[in-house]
Amino acid sequence: MMLLLLAKAASFAVIVWFYLTAKNHSQPPVQWAVIGLIGFWLAWWAVKLTFLTPLVGLAGKNATGVFLLTQIPAFVAIAAAYFIRKKLLADLQKS
């Protein structure tokens, strides 16, 4: 469970971040928060299932290596949330 701590904390931060951004731009905040959360978790699972499983096998029994590798999906998911938010804001500017 400790391995998911960063992912859980980041997903909560993404919800708040998207909610407040939508509220500041007079958009539906719950809808934005759900979009951000779905994007975050889709990116997290995609990286975990495609890249993480083979990489953890390479780390062997090195606890530090395994811990660091298991944080990669959270960092990629945070980046995905950033780009999703950027796209939502760009679409807002067009209309």
Image (cartoon, grey):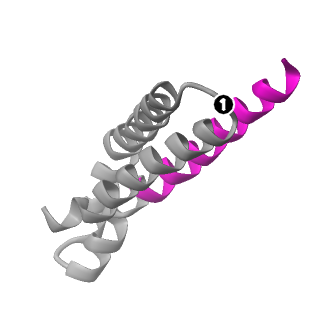
- Number of marks in the image? 1
Magenta: main secondary structure equals helix
| Side of 75 relative to 95 (left or right) | left
Q: Between residues 52 and 14, which one lies in front from this camera angle?
A: 14
Q: Position of residue 94 (x, y in %)?
A: 87, 22
The answer to whether 19 appears left or right of 9 in the picture is right
Q: Is residue 64 magenta?
A: no
Bounds of the magenta span? 74-95
* Residue at horizontal 48 percent and vertical 24 percent from the top: 31
Percent position (x, y) of residue 78? 51, 53
**Which image quadrant: the N terminus?**
bottom left
Mark 1: give few (<14), some (14-19) or many (20+) Cα within 10 Å.
few
Q: Residue lying farthest left?
A: 1
Residue occupying the point 55% across, 25% down? 28
Measuring from the top left, give residue 72's x and y in whole percent: 42, 60
Tell me the residue that label 1 is attached to. Answer: 26
| Quadrant into which the C terminus falls | top right
Question: In this rendering, would 78 be left or right of 3?
Answer: right
Circle 1 SS class: loop
Residue 38 percent location from the top left of the image: 41, 31
Residue drawn at 52 percent across, 50 percent down? 17
Amino acid on which the number 1 mark rests in the picture: Ser
Residue, far top: 95
Farthest right residue in view? 94
Residue drawn 39% across the image and 44% down it: 44
